[in-house]
Image (spheres, grey):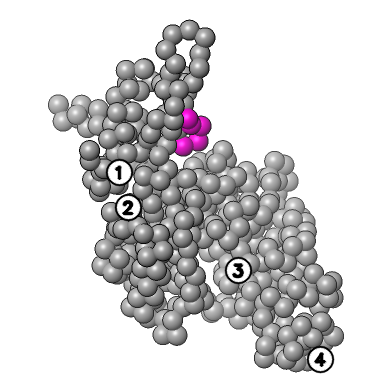
Amino acid sequence: MNTKKISRNMMRQFNQKLILRVLKDHGPLSKTQLSHITQLTIPAISDILEELSYYNLIEDYGQTPIKRGRFPILQKLNADAYKIVGITIESETIETAIVNLNGDIFESVTVPLPTLKTPESVVNEVYRSVHIMFERSNLSRGDLIGAGLGMHGIVDPVKGISIYPPHLNWGNVPIAKLLEDKLKLPVKVDNDCNTKALAERWFGEGKDVESFIIVNIDYGIGAGIMLRDQLFYGGNYGAGQIGHTVVKDDGPLCSCGNYGCLEAIASEPALLKEVVIKVKKGFPTKILELAGSPENISIEHLYEAAKLNDRMAVQLLESAGRFSGIAISTLVNLFNPQRVFITGGILKGGKHVLTPLYESVKQHSLKPNIKDLNVTPSKLGEAANVLGATTLWINELFSGNTPLEKVLDKRVVQD
């Protein structure tokens, strides 16, 4: 008896989320159109639409004319019914945004990390940013499903723990609980490359791709791996640490203690370090002219000089692209994805990075694995950070195992 009840509840929950996804991707639609797409009966569709309407997740879009009979009423996703706070704690900045169910950003705030990068000081800075957004948008916590956090390094998304964020020197910090206590909102957390993969899955070109990989090349380097529409975490949530793939035996020391890791060669801090060394040694370059002095050189000066075809800048970016391609080819050979999306600040290097990266992937990958492979920059741009964080709730609402009433915390608009 209990088994049948559980089965009925699970089927109801599955069908609710199926119709929500269809309306999100293809709406507005009539009951007949929904029935045709989902293969559910009209009475079943009617019952589910009534339930979704109760949660304020759908709304009437109007009628569509037909030749005979009553004009059918179209239903659409009510994307503004609930909002989500997206948070990313990067190596140097904290980004926050308020986003609706369609991924539209209403408010956003970016601030530098506090000088003291303790968990408490970072959480306080997040709270201040979210409070600013509340004031600007005139929203309250009751308008929100929750907050999602994208965190660099190794993360336990089940327990909400930041296990190892290398650029913050934390260890096993219960970051989700700390934020929940401060924000008074439910919080989900995952590695930021995983959240970017979810952003690509829900809002980018990964929508109709079962298996793809996001490679983020920025302050650090990591990968989010989507296999058959599921994130791949590995045994201890450490999958995707491509930045610590050794690509050069006699390479520089990495923060992880090994030599020749990709992150020690192709990350933005590694490139900046190499620029300063070469400038101080007297290598001819326009970078010094752009910066004024070695002490003022930033990563932006490298990208700017490359646009001017500065030889040293171009060579450094090409080298970063080649070594990145070697590491990506390892992922291609291991997981055989359909697509690889590149994200991060390194994209500012344009063709100087991407052309050698593509060539290197092609050269070092097994031929059958690249026959249909497409390696391209993500089109989500910088918005992928906060969008990805919100998709921890988007994914749960539209596709996860948690019932709608629990996801929405029973925050229902009553008549």
Of the numbered discs 3 and 1, the one sitting upstream in the chain is 3
Q: Position of residue 67 (x, y in %)?
A: 52, 9
Horizontal side, residue 320 vs residue 161: left or right:
right
Residue indicated by mark 4: 282
Taking the image as shown, residue 313 lies to the left or right of residue 126, namely right
Quadrant location, the C terminus: top left
Front-most of residues 215 and 91: 91
Between discs 3 and 4, the one toward the N terminus: 3
Cα distance between the residues tagged 1 and 2: 19 Å
Closer to the camera in the image, 137 or 315:
137
Residue marked by disc 2: 143
Question: Considering only order in the chain, which callout, 1 or 4, is on the residue closer to the N terminus?
Answer: 4
**Element under disc 4:** loop
How dense is the environment of label 1, judged by Cα within 10 Å: few (below 14), some, or many (20 and up)?
some
Q: Residues within 10 Å of mark 2 (few under 14, many from 20)?
A: some
N-term-proximal mark, 4 vs 2: 2
Quadrant in which the N terminus appears: top left
Is residue 236 covered in magenta? Answer: no
User: Which residue carries the number 3 mark?
Assistant: 218
Q: Residues within 10 Å of mark 3 (few under 14, many from 20)?
A: some
Q: Residue 310's x, y, as percent? A: 83, 75
How far across and down, in percent of the image, does residue 205 sit? 60, 45
Which stretch appears magenta? 24-28
Q: Disc 3 marks which amino acid?
A: Asp
Q: Give the residue pinned by disc 1.
A: 402
Residue type indicated by callout 1: Thr
Q: Are marks 4 and 1 in contact (CB under 8 Å)?
A: no
